[in-house]
Every structure is written in structure tokens, then in C-alpha cells.
Amino acid sequence: MDCKTAQHVWNHQGGFIAGINCRFKGLLIFLTDQAFAFTQGDQNPFDTAVKAKAGNGKYLVIHSDDSSVMSRMVHDVLGDKVANRIISEYVGKAVNLPTLQLANICCNGCSISDGSLSPEQELAIQMAAVNTNPDGTTIVP
């Protein structure tokens, strides 16, 4: 996020979460919905293809269109290490999964996991995501 937005969010008189809700309208609802889908075992063609390449695990990968306002918000907020930790905890409590980890993956996509993934898993997921189309087909360089 840009400096002015970060100042507003972090210095919001209602606290950080109120600042996020003020400047990133709908983001927490979106992330909570995605986390709930993860807890329910939902899949999508992109996630299925990434898991076929990177290996199964307790994670869900959601493709982003790279151009929507929501994808830019996800990227901006989850890219901030401290904001990511606070939001992962907040969303984790909302879906009753205290070990929830949110992350940026690939371009502006989102990865949700039950606890931390190993660096090797993260790299395998990253490489699979970068080389997979939204419909699950492989990108041919």
C-alpha cells in the first residue's frame, strides 16, 4: 500500500482493523469467505492443477485476475508482513482456524494454509502457480 494509505490504516482511531475496513472496503469479507471455503475443503480448477504439480497439502490457492480492485487490495495488504500477520489471526478467529496463514502467491493471487508451509513447499506452489492458467491448464512457455 502507498504511504498515505498505510498512515491512515495504521493510525486509524478505531485501530488497524477499522482502518483496513475503512480503506480496503470488502477485503476482510473476501478473505474470510476464501478462508471459510478452505475450511470446507472447497477446490477450484487452479488449486487442483497447482496441487497436481506441487503436491497436496493443507492449502488452497486462489487465482487472481491481476486487474480487479480486490486483487490489488489483497496484494497490497498481504504483502505487508505485519498487516498479514494481524489479518491472518483476525480471519483465522472468524473461521475457527487459529493456525490460518494468508499469503500472496504468484501474481496477485492468494494462498491460504493451515499453518506455515515449508520453504520447499512454498517454492513448489509458486512455480506451479506461475505456470498454470486460471482454468487449470499448463502454460507453455
Image (spheres, rainbow, N blue to C red):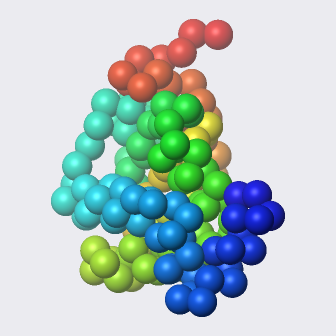
Q: Residue at x 55, y 32 (%)?
A: 67
Does 108 appear above or below 134?
below
Query: Could you tell whether 63 is left or right of 9 in the image?
Result: left
Q: Quadrant of the C terminus?
A: top right
Residue 1: percent from left, percent from top: 71, 58
Instruction: Judge by depth and name the residue closer to the eye, 86 or 6.
Output: 6
Instruction: Judge by depth and name the residue closer to the eye, 92 or 28.
Output: 28
Does 117 appear above or below 92?
above
Q: Residue at x 54, y 15 (%)?
A: 139
Extreme-right residue of the structure: 3
Query: Could you tell whether 53 is left or right of 96 in the image?
Result: right
Extreme-top residue of the structure: 140
Examine the image and state in which quarter residue 9 appears.
Answer: bottom right
Q: Is residue 5 visible?
A: yes
Residue 77: percent from left, percent from top: 61, 61
Query: Could you tell whether 119 is left or right of 135 in the image?
Result: right
Q: Is residue 99 visible?
A: no
Examine the image and state in which quarter residue 34 appears.
Answer: bottom left
Does 5 appear above or below 91?
above
Q: Residue at x 45, y 60 (%)?
A: 25
Residue 122: percent from left, percent from top: 59, 51
